[in-house]
Amino acid sequence: MMLNLNSPIKTPYHGLAVSLKLILLALTTVYVYQLETPLLLACLFIITLILNLIPGKDFLKLAIRNLTPVIPFMVFILIWHIITAAWLSGVILLVKFLIVITLANLVTMTSRLDDMIAFLERLVQPLKKIGLDLSFLGLAFGLVLRSVANLIAIGKKLNLAWRSRSLKRPTWRIVFPLVCSALGDADHVAYAIKARRSNTS
Amino acid sequence: MERNIAYIALFAALTAALGFIPIITLGFGVPITAQTLGVMLSGCILGAWRGGLAILLLIILVALGVPLLAGGRGGLGLFLSPSAGFLIGWPVGAFVSGLIMERSKTLKPLLSSLIASIIGGILVIYTSGVIGMFVILDQTFIEILYLAMAFIPGDMIKAVISGMIVMLLCKYRPHSVISRNG
């Protein structure tokens, strides 16, 4: 499983600060959702495409590939608007989605996961002043990323075990042992963190 | 503290993993994944705060660009799409499921978790999703509600599965069902 959606192709946007990219994205999103002029929206869409084309054709292909998960929903919305005889507003809405989602994906593709986590940790820092210590966030992120691959592997093994004993497809019954496995792992991880903390303190 | 972090992280991971293992096959052979089952289970097993935080942790990682949603989806783009409301409703749904589990200890585990999963995992998530679509899309509330209804039968199956898993856990691993022990 791919661990993040960061682009392997280096772009000029990689050098920009994550905070700056997120602020620009937020401002653009608010602006685009307020627009109703088709011509202006079309211009913004072309600018978005150019932004994705600047790092090269391969990057643009990657950006288009990252859009595929939302395409079925967009097609559905367009068909729906055509059926309800509001095709123009359907097209306008679709272009707005394409602009903001492509720009958001651009931020995701050009920001390293470490930088994003560091930004988030800086963002929640002021909460410490009101007694909310979120210093465990980094540890929790690491635990999730390590455990997902492990749990998927266990799920696949349970799947195989089921198939070796039955001609029927594996059903929800494999979820119970998977949940038990996660609970068992959680107990072991809790002991490990406690042991490590008591060793370092 | 350590136990809380471990449980929250492991349930975030479990919910993500459920998106990559098709565990329900519909009558006509189409496999569907079960990440919303993970949302229901997190609330029902861990309770309101831990369950809600587990799903919030998953959502934050998805926003940061980790492709942990079914089909390898992730990134900020998902939070600007018309279905963003459903995603934002996940942590609230897990919280509400957990709250119902914590407040209904006198009921049998199956009934209690079934109610918690239906209210938290379906009602809350759909309310958030429908409101999100209503804000973004240029359609009436009733039309959007009608559209969202198509997915409810699948989620009802997941609520029943969630109820059965919690019932089995209460029977064989009662100490793990934190929502009923706290």
Image (spheres, coloured by chain):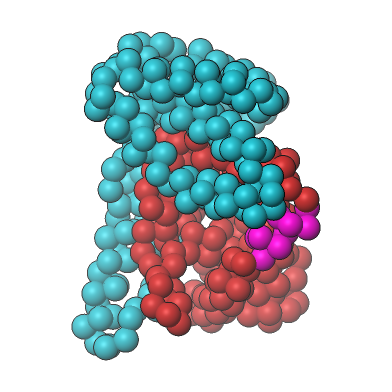
For the magenta stretch, what is the residue range? B141-149
Q: Residue A23 vs residue B127: left or right? A: left
For chain B, give the colour.
Answer: red
Camera-side residue: A36 or A137? A36
Regarding residue B168, the answer to whether it shows in the image is yes
Camera-side residue: A129 or B135? B135
Q: Quadrant of the N terminus of chain B?
A: top right
- What residue sits 69% from the left and 26% below the top? A36
Question: Where is residue A161 drawn, in percent x and y?
Answer: 24, 78
Residue A159 falls inside the magenta stretch: no
- What residue sits 36% from the left and 35% below the top? A64
Quadrant of the rendered structure where residue B36 is?
bottom right
Outermost residue toward the front in this view: A85
For chain A, give the colour.
Answer: cyan
Q: Is residue A131 above or below residue A67?
A: above
Label the magenta part by its dominant secondary structure. Answer: helix
